[in-house]
Amino acid sequence: MAIHPIDFRYGTVGMRNIWDEDNRFASIVKAEIALARAEGDHGLIPEKAALEIVEKAKNASLKRANEIEAEINHDMMAVVKAITEVTGESGRWIHFGATSNDILDTATGLQIKDSLLLIEAKLKALLGVLLKRAKETQTLVCAGRTHGQIGVPTTYGLRFAIWAAEVARHIERLEEMRPRVAVGQMTGAVGTQASMGLKGHDVMVTMMKYLELHPVDVSNQLIQRDRYAEYFMFLANMATTLDKIGVEIRMMQRSEIGEMEEAFGKNQVGSSTMPHKRNPIKSEQVCGLARVVRSFVEPALLNNTLWDERDLTNSSCERVIFPEASILADHILNVMIGVLEGIRLNPENIRRNLEMLHGVNMAESVMIELTKRGMDRQNAHEIVRVSSMSAFEMKTPVSEILSQNKEVSSYLKKEEIESLLLPDNYIGTAEWQVDNLIKKLLPMAI
């Protein structure tokens, strides 16, 4: 019976397969095979034995390893024995010179490598969707908001572009950290490689070439967990961007705002009691699970504070946080791609909200122009501020109050004031910024 929602509700098949028990076992076997090949290449074990291990080790089974572990209560040694059973005489060389974490951490490096490939592809797909949306809405003027209050205008194109730029930075971060986190080691019991003599470093380098992993420079019995902490912080950072987008979608889907909404299926049900409801449940799911992904950062950091050359406090923790963080981060990335592909904009409501304050939100435009024409900037700010507050209180268009002000009218005609209060005339370089970003980032997107 499934207990964890990852087993039946959250997660993609691809990421689940990377972190499931079968692939974990297969990754450990791959590491043992690569070690044997490398040791055969450098004469630490007979070449014939290395070839036989390469050929037969893949026949080892997880079931048999679990049976052995139940007897000896040591997971890594159980795998070694299971491989030894299927490799015949050559099995005596399995795990030669290695300690458990040489193999276990290298297996984790393989899983991280594959996870980053999946996440990278999806980040590029998300970037492509955001750039497409930015282009489609490049000239769609909307109300900008600060502190939850309507401010000067912006565009939906710029809003999507800002998200796209953030996603692009995550792609860059992923590329930068890959050689630090997709790593393996073969360093022995305390990091000296004494069990392999002077050939230890060469064996490790060759082993990692076979696995397409980066070798550590130095280590003790296990790979230093600052590397893994970086992986978890990357997932948390990425999840926070998805959370940020989800919050904005949820805010804009509020009934009284209604500027955009998630796609809603023909037979979809919004509420068990309120038949009219159209809830942003996908964005809410992203925001909720992003909290879980972020929560793994602290244990990942604490896993780096181990005793001396190693202790075991990281092990049980990592068995939980690696699959959960990877699967949930990949899941919400996948969900947000779908949300943004199907997102619907409501131009009528966007325009309604933009014009809701009857020009008061355009006060900055008037202040700037008054200053350009010679009025003291602070004086212009005060006049426009007082006029705006009066417009709010009297529920009168601010253009009327400003045009009746003698100081203002000495600089601006009524029609000029009205032109300055048109939101479409006050979006600065927003359209250019979108164009510029698309040209820069499109080669990076899928």
Image (cartoon, grey):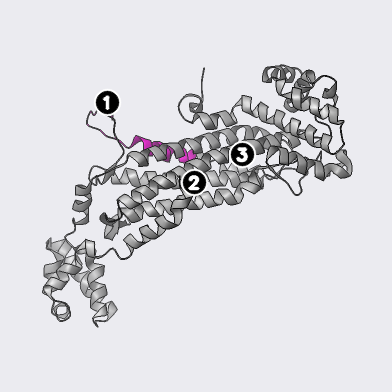
Total labels drawn:
3
Q: Nearer the viewer, residue 36 or 302?
A: 36
Question: Which class describes the residues within 10 Å of circle 3: few (<14), some (14-19), or many (20+)?
Answer: many
Where does the image place residue 97, in percent across and percent down from the top left? 84, 35
**Range shown magenta:** 267-292
Label 3 to label 2: alpha-carbon separation: 16 Å
Residue at the far bottom: name it: 374
Residue 274 is one of the magenta-drawn residues = yes
User: Does residue 412 appear anywhere in the picture?
Assistant: yes
Give the class, few, some or many, for how many residues have Cα within 10 Å of label 2's Cα (few <14, many ≥20): many
Residue 74: assigned label? none
Which residue position holds label 3? 112
> Can you give x and y, in whole percent of width and height, for residue 351 in the image?
20, 53
Q: Element type at marker 1?
A: loop
Type of the residue with mark 3: Ile
Which mark is drawn over residue 238?
2
Residue name at image x 48 percent, y 41 percent: 122
Q: If the image is split into quadrants, where does the C terminus sit? A: top left
Q: What residue is shown with label 1? A: 267
| Rendered residue at 33%/39% (across/down) | 342
Indicate yes or no whether the magenta region holds residue 328: no
**Between marks 1 and 2, how big is the CA–CA gap?**
32 Å
- Amino acid identity at mark 1: Asn
Report which quarter residue 114 is drawn in. Answer: top right
Q: Position of residue 363 (x, y in %)?
A: 23, 67
Secondary structure at numbered mark 2: helix
